[in-house]
Amino acid sequence: MANFSTPLSGLQAQSAAIDIVGNNLANLNTTGFKASSASFRDLISASLGASGTQVGQGVQTPLSVRKFQQGSIQQTGGAFDAAIGGQGFFVVLDSQGKQLYTRAGDFKVDAAGNLLTQSGDRVQGWTSSGGVLSATGAIGNIVVPSGGTSKPVPTSIFSADLNLNAEGAVGQPSGTFSTAVEVVDSLGAKHVLTLTFTKTASNAWDYKITIPGQEVTGGAAGTPSSVASGSLTFDAQGNLTAPAPPPPATNGVVAVTIPAFTNGAAALSPKWSLFDTSFKPRLTQYSQPSAASATAQDGLVAAAPVQISLGDGGQIVAQYSDERQKVVAQIALASIRNPDSLISVGGNNFLASALTSEPTIGAANAGGLGQILSGSLEASTVDIAKEFTNLIVYQRGYQANSKVITTLDELTQETINIKR
């Protein structure tokens, strides 16, 4: 009977190997699927007599070894599609709260704003809190804003980069210049401040900041209301010398006081910044026509998200109706030193086994983790040509072992016939 057990083990091994090939081919188009290979192992050999001759007793059922190789990256254009280029796994939680790992990044968003896999598992990462996103600490369910209006932020500081014509004449049109700067009130409405500069002497200018009178309490329609005024002094090189540059911090800015607005917004006290962060004057006086090159302010109007999508690096970006963009979440990746120890649990997911090393979780492109490519998916690593070749080889192996059994059966019949 030992003669029959050896080829029978071969039949079982080849059959198991064909099952592995069949599973690979079945997942030829499965997103993020990693192909497996059959690893054959022989059985311990039996010793015959004192001569030390050994005869093999067959083959064990082959191990299914999953190869975590990089799959090809395919562009899809999906708003929440993501592919990992390099090492790492997306981290998800299933309905029972178990932490799973996957390479499939075909995500979706439900009605509550939860970022989910196609199987309904919750994608893990970091979500902004209070407008601040920190990709450190414990990970949690990613929730993207699904509507609502952001709170407006009133202007606290504004600036204007401009040049005043050094050749302007006092009392002449060349000696005056005006430019406009927008500010935002506490209700999110925009207002226009007019900055008017008038030359008073060589290297000296007066400034006056006004707002339309009908927009503030106490103002008169058609008459600008003054909210700040003062003088500017330049040196012979055209540099602003007064007001003096910082430090101290109280220098380099002009206090502006705007009364309460007629639309119900509170009074506003923004500062006019005359110097940039490197203490370089924003205002110059050169022999060039007076002109403004840039204006800026830090106020934000109320805005609603109009589009939310996933960007490179795993950041989820919200685009608001005022055209600004804001990162609202970050997808986490997990690095596992021995991914071949993971257990496949279906749905493109893997579960850590007792042999799996402790995962290291972080953002993409950090700590050896790969990059996250937006609008893309990682294709299956199944090589159809290789699998068909393996299928033929395993089929031939099965046929060969079947032939051994047939031959043994014929020899047994011959032995029985001799006895008769």
Image (cartoon, rainbow, N blue to C red):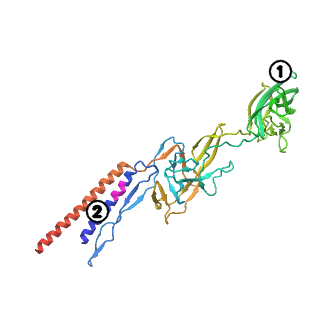
Q: Is residue 103 left or right of residue 246?
A: left
Q: Position of residue 87 (x, y in %)?
A: 52, 53
Q: Residue furthest bottom?
A: 50
On the rendered image, what quadrant is the N terminus found in?
Answer: bottom left
Give the vertical position of 294 relative to 77 (above or below): above
The residue identified by callout 2 is 11
| Magenta portion: prevailing SS class | helix
Q: Position of residue 207 (x, y in %)?
A: 85, 30
Residue count near mark 1 (Cα–Cα under 10 Å), binned few <14, some 14–19, many ≥20: few
* Gap between marks 2 and 1 measured at Cα: 101 Å
Horizontally, residue 69 falls left or right of residue 187, namely: left
8 sits left or right of 80 in the view? left
Mark 2 residue type: Leu
> Is residue 19 covered in magenta?
yes
Question: At x 29% / y 73%, what residue is drawn?
Answer: 46
Q: Nearer the viewer, residue 193 or 389?
A: 193
Image quarter (top left, top right, bottom left or bottom right) of the C terminus: bottom left
Residue 361 image-quadrant placement: bottom right
Marks 2,1: beta carbons within 8 A: no
- What's drawn in magenta, residue-wise? 17-22
Of residues 223 and 290, the one drawn nearer to the viewer in this rendering: 223
Query: Above or below — where is 323 with respect to 117?
Result: above
Would residue 28 be visible to someone looking at this image? yes
Question: What residue sits right under mark 1 in the picture?
Answer: 173
